[in-house]
Image: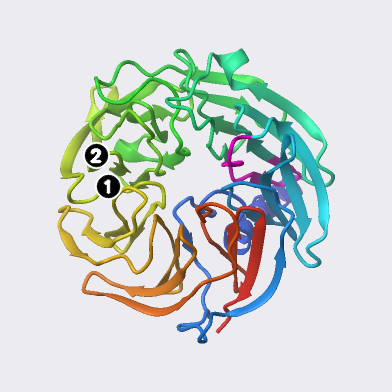
């Protein structure tokens, strides 16, 4: 019986690990991908695109207005969009593109939704611009539970563009950032919504504004402590994953308009960048008594590198991304030194959203064009370029690659392109 029990336990653990590994490799189930780093680990993709762009396989034009990107899991596409007088979480069948369900989560915003839904097994989580976190059944969109950031946590935004965060699932917890004085970040039971802990953040300094920013939480292990790292109205900070205890904070990178890009964590290091005449910093985390301290390794001012909202990607010890307000001049920064190795003229107008896959960068500019870029610490080379169909407003939704296909959203449009090699 002991052998049988041990064998069953071993097989169960192996099966759970295999399922997790499969999900990480096979599905794009959350904001910026399985590891929240904007890196797709598929191979066998096109090294160049045909003139005029890859083959368009299909498009959907019923999403509703929004800047939300997409998640893909278990044969379904998940996103959000404003439809008439409501903001909805929406699911489509990946194979047929048939809409499976659309569940309201709150009122519409002036130019649409922001959050990218997070899928976890039979449940999917999303945050509306009204500050409501909802948990829904994947199968039919039924609401399981919801939390109102303002009413239940005293939450607020640092400025007027409303909540934009994509929730994080870690084990049995769902993490989010209401931005309240006693609940800057909260951990909830992912199945019931019950509060596990609330994290308060002390004053980090005079820069920025109180409240949540427009970023999303990432997991770090700096100084040997598992923690959740987030950029909010007063800067970047980390809290202990198990208890929500405040660990460290850094104010210099905050601005008073909108702190947006998702931080990047790498071992003991944290990178953060914001726009609006601010800049970028690399921090090193180390033990300090029974806590953690964050020390600035280097700082780049607004005339050197400031990412607005297209995001930055870390590849082989180098940061790649666009700089300036609603701008995308391509830049490469050596991580450890902060040295700018090159900075090129932007090939298109507006902010640039970066995605790395199979040795190339896919870069989507807000004015519409998409480039395939061979970028290394030595040089930046545009390999291919095309302009997909356009819709209203800026094309700010971040691109996604899944199963050899490139997904591009612009407002109510979602387009799928074949990029298999």
Q: Secondary structure at mark 2?
A: loop
Q: Which residue is mark 1?
A: 306
User: Magenta part mainly helix, strand or loop?
Assistant: loop
Task: Tell me whether the residue at label 1 lies in contact with that at label 2, contact meaning CB atoms closer than 8 angstroms.
Answer: yes
**Residue 121 part of the magenta segment:** yes
Q: Which residue is mark 2?
A: 277
Q: Which residues are magenta?
A: 109-124
Image quadrant of residue 294? top left
Residue 128 pos. (x, y %): 63, 33
Q: Residue at 66% across / 20% down in the picture?
A: 194
Residue 115 pos. (x, y %): 58, 41
Residue 21 pos. (x, y %): 59, 58
Query: How is the structure coloured here?
Result: rainbow
Q: Is residue 193 visible from the viewing direction of this image?
A: no
Q: Is residue 135 visible from the viewing direction of this image?
A: yes
Q: Residue at 66% across / 51% down in the picture?
A: 16
- Looking at the image, tell me whether mark 1 or mark 2 is earlier in sequence order: 2
- Up the image or down, 385 lies above or below 27; here it is below
Q: Residues within 10 Å of mark 1 (few under 14, many from 20)?
A: many
């Amino acid at each position: 019986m002991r052998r049988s029990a041990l064998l069953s336990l071993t097989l169960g653990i192996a099966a759970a690990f295999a399922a997790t590994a499969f999900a990480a490799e096979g599905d794009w189930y959350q904001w910026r991908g399985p590891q929240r780093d904007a890196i797709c680990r598929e191979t066998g993709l096109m090294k160049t695109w045909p003139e005029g762009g890859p083959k368009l396989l299909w498009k959907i034009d019923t999403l509703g207005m929004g800047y939300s990107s997409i998640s893909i899991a278990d044969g379904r596409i998940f996103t959000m969009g404003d439809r008439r007088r409501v903001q909805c979480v929406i699911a489509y069948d990946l194979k047929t593109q048939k809409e499976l369900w659309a569940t309201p989560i709150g009122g519409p915003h002036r130019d649409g939704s922001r959050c990218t839904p997070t899928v976890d097994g039979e449940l999917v989580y999303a945050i509306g611009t009204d500050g409501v976190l909802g948990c829904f059944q994947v199968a039919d969109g039924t609401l399981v539970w919801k939390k109102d950031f303002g009413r239940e946590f005293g939450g607020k935004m640092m400025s007027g563009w409303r909540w934009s965060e994509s929730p994080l699932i870690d084990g049995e917890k769902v993490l989010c950032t209401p931005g309240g004085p006693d609940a800057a970040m909260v951990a909830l039971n992912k199945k019931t919504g019950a509060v596990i802990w609330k994290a308060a953040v002390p004053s980090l300094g005079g820069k920025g504004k109180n409240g949540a920013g427009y970023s999303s939480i990432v997991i770090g292990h700096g100084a040997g402590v598992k923690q959740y790292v987030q950029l909010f109205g007063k800067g970047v900070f980390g809290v202990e994953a198990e208890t929500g205890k405040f660990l460290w904070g850094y104010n210099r990178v905050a601005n008073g308009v909108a702190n947006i890009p998702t931080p990047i964590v790498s071992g003991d290091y944290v990178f953060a960048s914001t726009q609006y005449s601010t800049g970028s910093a690399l921090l090193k985390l180390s033990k300090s008594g029974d806590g953690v301290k964050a020390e600035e390794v280097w700082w780049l001012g607004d005339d050197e590198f400031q990412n607005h909202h297209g995001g930055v990607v870390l590849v082989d010890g180098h940061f790649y991304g666009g700089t300036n307000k609603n701008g995308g001049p391509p830049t490469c920064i050596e991580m450890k030194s902060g040295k700018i190795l090159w900075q090129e003229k932007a090939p298109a107008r507006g902010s640039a959203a970066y995605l790395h896959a199979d040795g190339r960068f896919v870069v989507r500019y807000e004015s519409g064009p998409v480039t395939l870029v061979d970028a290394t610490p030595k040089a930046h080379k545009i390999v291919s370029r095309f302009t997909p169909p356009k819709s209203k407003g800026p094309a700010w939704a971040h691109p996604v690659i899944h199963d050899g296909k490139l997904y591009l959203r612009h407002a109510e449009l979602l387009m799928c392109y074949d990029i298999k090699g």
